[in-house]
Image: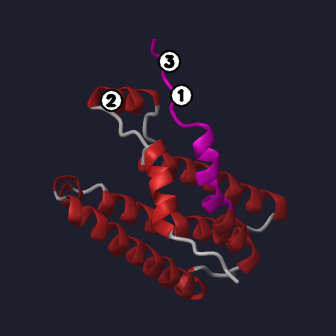
Amino acid sequence: MVPDFDVRDEDKVEDADFKPLTAAEAQLWRQRNPPLSLWWVLLGQALVGSVVALAAWLLTGKAANGWSAAYGVLSVVVPAALFAQGVTGRLARTVPGAAMVGFFVWELVKIAVTVAMLFAAPRLVSGLNWLALLAGFVVTMKVVWVALLFRPKRQRTA
């Protein structure tokens, strides 16, 4: 026999431990935890991607491998820049509901542009090396996690 379990009972226990922040506490929390700019992450992705493309060229001695890796980098950075512009635009800042819907719309745009760029790669990059493209693509995507380590430092307040 399965014991009766009411989800609402569990919610009551969790709600009892929850204490909303006051306006002053929320402001203090924001000061201690500054947000990470999407543009800062994009800059980091572009810089690291440039290093990967240059390394692909220098390590293999083939410019086509460098261009392939660079195209992989662009396949991440260009759609991400469109996304960042879309979600930080004027409409997203002024209308809260539009911000939420806009996030999903711009995420779909980002995915569509990425897929389109990857499909166009064989026609746009002469001597395309898919392995180099994939290396540039993956390393550039993973820079987001590294950017979290280098975000603005928490401020200490008394």
Gap between marks 2 and 3, in whole Å? 13 Å
Residue positioned 33% across, 75% down in the render: 105
Q: Is residue 143 magenta?
A: yes
Q: Which residue is mark 2?
A: 27
Horizontal placement of 133 versus 117: left or right? right
User: For the magenta stretch, what is the residue range?
Assistant: 139-158
Which numbered mark, 1 or 3, is in the foreground of this view? 3
Gap between marks 2 and 1, in whole Å? 16 Å
Name the secondary structure under disc 3: loop
Instruction: Note whether 64 is above or below 85 in the view shown.
Output: below
Q: Which residue is mark 1?
A: 153
Q: Is residue 96 visible?
A: yes
What amino acid type should be assigned to the residue bearing mark 1? Lys
What amino acid type should be assigned to the residue bearing mark 3? Arg
The label on residue 112 is none
The image quadrant that residue 123 belongs to is bottom right
Residues packed near mark 3 inside 10 Å, few (<14), some (14 to 19) or many (20 plus): few
Q: Which residue is mark 3?
A: 156
Q: Position of residue 27 (x, y in %)?
A: 33, 29
Q: Nearer the viewer, residue 92 or 25?
A: 25
